[in-house]
Amino acid sequence: MSTTMIGMRSLALVLLLTAAAAPARAASEADYKAAYAAAEAAAREAAGLRNQWTPTVSTLAAAKKAGDGGDFDRAVAAAKEAEALAKASIFQATSEKEAWKAMEIR
Amino acid sequence: MKTRSAIWLGSALFALTALGFTAQRVIAADKIDPATEAKAFQNFYFQKFPNVKHEDFVNGPYSMNEDMKRQWQEKEEFPPYEFALDAGKEMFATPFKNGKTYADCFPNGGIGIRQNYPYFDGKEGKVVTLELALNRCRAANGEEPYSYVKDEMASLTAYMAFTSRGKLMDIKIPDDPRALEAYENGKRYFYTRRGQMNFSCASCHVQSPGERIRAEILAPALGILNAMPIYRSEWSGMGTTSRRFITCNSQTRAVPLEPQSDEYRDVEYFLSYVANGLPISGPGARP
């Protein structure tokens, strides 16, 4: 129970931090590239766990579109959101490795 | 809407309580006995729905709702899958370019054998579904494979199911550790939460059968594959088992897997095995 609860809390934290981290200054292309690379890496890990979420894919695509269009503020925000989504799906896949058993009909 | 949020809340609470038990269960780490598990699976539904005749569970949502069942029985006089059935019958009989037919690939010429699929293939060490076997038959005879989610595959499986109507599901788990592992993997896939909505197959088809989600009444997981493939008005056409799995994954905001991926093959094996003894009713028609 306790590890999972910590996991859940840190997941909530990830989401909070993401929201809080919206930059005060305008984002640069470099910011976007860094945020996008991080999001892509997390999404790749989720796919490797066979647990990609559809919103991760669409949000990542939205980040790329905004980045390609030069709207780096929007692109960074979307990339960070995609990263948070991917991380949540990784957390889900990891905890379900054991948690699924509780649902089983016996 | 109301039911849906209830399902949501319910599954969230369930997840939390459930997690508390996990540690204990791991230690218990019991040996897998599919026959006993299948019995427990069936009893769960027989007890939850004491008024549903056992052989009726194979009719999906219709087993759960009397009004719907009446509408369906009227519809069965002019079944919407008839077109696919006729097409499938013709396709099945039409020789490939090399002169052979599907009948050459299957036991008993492919007639009345649906209840034995999927089966565990000892040579490959994996589960082989009917859809997979059909495409392998095509490949072996120099033909292009069909899409797993389109009409041709649905027509072929509709015809094969039809020739097996009333036969009891009869899935074997041979004495091979890989077969047991495939069953276990399918079971795990079935109960594992996925997608942004944090649903497993069981969240809908075990915890909420008979309840409405959007306009649809959820089918019980018991016998859930016996009616495949199905005609759905919402699809304005036929859907294969592959198509149904993909749709169900998408509904929970999970990226679906490739048709006939190991996970889908294994979950089909699990769900069919626990339906052993229940009649094939396919092809089916859904609202």
Image: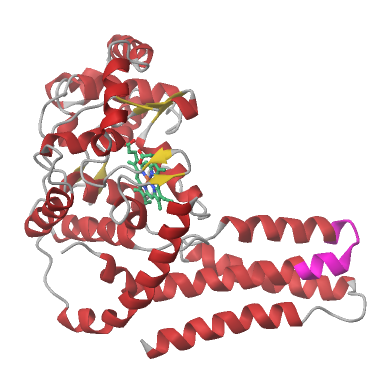
Q: Is residue A15 visible?
A: yes
Q: How many marks?
A: 0
At a point 45% along the width and 44% down the height, the residue shown is B246
Q: Which percent across, then down, holds residue B286?
A: 36, 28
Q: Which percent across, then down, holds residue B1?
A: 50, 50
- Taking A92 as reference, is B21 left or right? left
The span picked out in magenta is A67-77
- Placement of the C terminus of chain B among the 4 image quadrants: top left
- Taking B221 as reference, is A71 left or right? right
- Residue B235, compared with residue B212, is above or below; it is above
Q: Which percent across, then down, holds residue B78?
A: 32, 10
Q: Which percent across, then down, holds residue A7?
A: 48, 84
Q: Quadrant of residue B136?
A: top left
- Residue B263, compared with residue B98, is above or below; it is below
- Residue B63, compared with residue B268, is above or below; it is above
Does the stretch in magenta take in B256? no
Look at the magenta stretch and give its main secondary structure.
helix
Does the stretch in magenta take in A69? yes
- Taking B254 as reference, is A13 left or right? right
Q: Quadrant of residue B9?
A: bottom left
At a point 9% along the width and 51% down the height, the residue shown is B174
